Image (spheres, grey):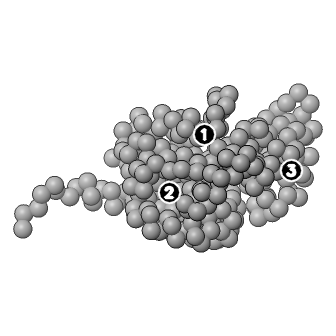
Amino acid sequence: MKPRLFFFHSNGFPARTYGHFLKTLETWNPEAINILGADLSSLGGTMDPMVEEVISQVAPAKGNAIGIGHSLGGSLCILAQASQPNLFQNMILLDPPIFSPLKRSAIRWLRRLGILEWFSPSRRVRRRRNTFTSRNQALEYFAAKPLFQDFPKSSLELYIEEGLSPAQNGFQLRIPREREAEIYDSIPDRLPETIYAGRGVLIYSQKMEVLKHLDLQWWKKSFPGFKQIGFPGGHLFPLEAPEKLGNLIQSILIDLTEEHAEKSEKPLFEVA
């Protein structure tokens, strides 16, 4: 039976802003929550409520599932799998901010000192412009930002279409900047031991804006069930090169499902 495919978006980018990427996977009928945590009034300083949301969506597949998660979405996938070990057959994680022990220790101490925000994107996010009088104004605003410099025009236009919602005097960010900042401030500084049993593929940005050399070395040592693939571009490479990434993931999906089928068909006992 073909596995169900679930996609989970990054912080600040609703799933529909990945429309060009998801279109390349349409033969797999990808399922996605457009905005993770939309019904949560607060995260309470932890990603646990969003992890539970992922588990609730995927659990009906009864293990016949593959999870694809970008950034935040990748972290939620592997944390959900750690909580429910049979949730996914495999995962494809796109540059998830699951860091080495050294970096997590630094985050933990900064949090204890109450100054994590000074070193986190949350401080910048809280100052980000939140409302616009028109979509054209928003397009000009974001097109001038370094974060969007490598977006093709089609991806930026889709972000303006799906990343904004109508407001009283124009448009506003569909994911409020306060929630985006709250997610950054809730990044885990401790990981469950069961997380290391996960399996699949880790695709990381070759610019290494989030996962650095030390993180990747730790991943290679600590997650034997994951293969690593470098992808050209920055942390937002699923939006920078959606078709190229989609083609790569299609081939990975075929390999993963064939590998799973072979293991499933292998008899429990072999006669010598």
Q: Which residue is mark 3?
A: 139
The vertical placement of 70 against 135, above or below, is below
Tell me which residue sits at (68%, 48%) in the image. Answer: 111
- SS label for mark 3: helix
Q: Residues within 10 Å of mark 1 (few under 14, many from 20)?
A: some
The amino acid type found where label 3 is placed reads Leu
Q: Which residue is mark 1?
A: 46
The vertical placement of 48 against 206, above or below, is above
Q: Are marks 2 and 1 in contact (CB under 8 Å)?
A: no
Quadrant including the C terminus:
bottom left
Residue 92 placement (x, y as % from top left): 50, 57
156 on left or right of 27? right
Which image quarter: residue 224? bottom left
Q: Residues within 10 Å of mark 3 (few under 14, many from 20)?
A: some
Residue 39 placement (x, y as % from top left): 64, 28
Q: Which residue is mark 2?
A: 92
Residue 186 placement (x, y as % from top left): 64, 44
- Return the residue nearer the eye: 94 or 154: 94
- SS label for mark 1: loop
Tell me which residue sits at (11%, 61%) in the image. Answer: 270
Tell me which residue sits at (48%, 33%) in the image. Answer: 56
Q: Is residue 164 visible?
A: no
